[in-house]
Image (cartoon, grey):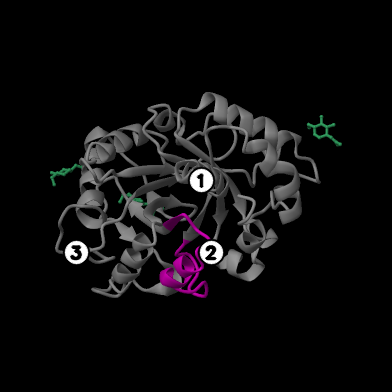
Amino acid sequence: MANKCNAILSLLLLLLVGTSHGGGIAIYWGQNGNEGTLSQACATAKYSHVNIAFLNNFGNGQTPQMNLAGHCNPSILNSCTKFSAEIKDCQSKGIKVLLSIGGGIGNYSLSSIEDARNVSKFLWNTFLGGKSPSRPLGDAVLDGVDFDIELGSTANWEHLARFLKAYSRRGREVYLAAAPQCPIPDRFLGTALNTGLFDFVWVQFYNNPPCSYANGNITNLLNSWSRWTNTVPATNIFLGLPAAPAAAGSGYIPPDVLTNQILPEIKKSPKYGGVMLWSRFYDVKNGYSDSIVNSV
Ligand SMILES: *[C@@H]1O[C@H](CO)[C@@H](O)[C@H](O)[C@H]1NC(C)=O
Ligand SMILES: *[C@@H]1O[C@H](CO)[C@@H](O)[C@H](O)[C@H]1NC(C)=O
Ligand SMILES: *[C@@H]1O[C@H](CO)[C@@H](O)[C@H](O)[C@H]1NC(C)=O
């Protein structure tokens, strides 16, 4: 009898866990000083992944530089190391914290395979498990690197992915993420994605009307989602969205449309990983993740 009860209890628990862990919410943090701290973001318990944005100058032999808007000045010694404890705090809650490289403003490109190798070594020593006298985010070891490549040269990103993934050690995976635009193939990241090395791909379903939500019509978005999940070799694919109308030029989806019409469809894919939001600043203003978190 007790055994039977235990078995039923376990089954119930399994079902419960199975439904409540459908997907996560990934958030970009770092591009607005008024969005609150990393610890505050992680304390909401709404996010599964935080991308610290951005390292936006690197490659082509340049001295790499971060930009964290009003949060701190990475070029001043120890200005941003206060975030080390906050990164560890987020990680202790099971949240993966990644460094996002690239972005819409900056100067970055990889001039050769050797340049890609040098950048991978810099990232490993400065933000991941390596050592460097100059670590702007302190001694916290980030979980991986997010490629938000939107400008410069399209070449050599697959080599950077390969070199970074090779730093994975037993028990300490270097996670790779990417934020391609929804048209396939992505001009900058298509070749890199085809390596199959990316763990999390948060596709930007915004600023791209042919594959985004527009004028109340979900057809183009669902068709594009199905192409991503059926043709791109990534482990987890996320629906990337603006967290407020002002967060992007187009593609904002009212929360009720997302939860009633879109999530039930896209969750059918075994590659569904959740929703990515740009950005923490807009999410705080609009309360978007509050509205969707129970449906994700
Ligand atoms: C890569 O790093 C090595 C060693 O620091 C340096 O000599 C070389 O010029 C770098 N290559 C590029 C393309 O920056
Ligand atoms: C970007 O960096 C390269 C290499 O340092 C430099 O030659 C180029 O002038 C820079 N471009 C801009 C727009 O700053
Ligand atoms: C929605 O968009 C699709 C693709 O562009 C189009 O074929 C369809 O007619 C649209 N549906 C409505 C209700 O406008």
Neighbor class of circle 1 (other Cα within 10 Å; few <14, some 14-19, many 20+) is few
Q: Earlier in the sequence, mark 3 or mark 1?
A: 1
Q: Is residue 63 above or below residue 281?
A: above
The CA span between labels 3 and 2 is: 27 Å
Residue marked by disc 2: 280
The dot on residue 134 is 3
Give, as a three-letter code, the residue at label 2: Arg
Q: Residue at x 36, y 33 (%)?
A: 197
Give, as a three-letter code, the residue at label 1: Cys
Quadrant location, ligand no. 1: top left
Query: Depth check: 103 or 290 in front?
Result: 290
Q: Residue at x 35, y 32 (%)?
A: 158
- Residue 68, given in percent of the width and then of the height, sits at 41, 66
Q: Residue at x 34, y 72 (%)?
A: 73
Q: Is 36 covered by the magenta stretch?
A: yes
* Cβ of mark 3 under 8 A from ligand 1: no
Q: Which residues are magenta?
A: 29-51
Describe residue 85's horizontal placement relative to residue 192 as left or right.
Answer: left
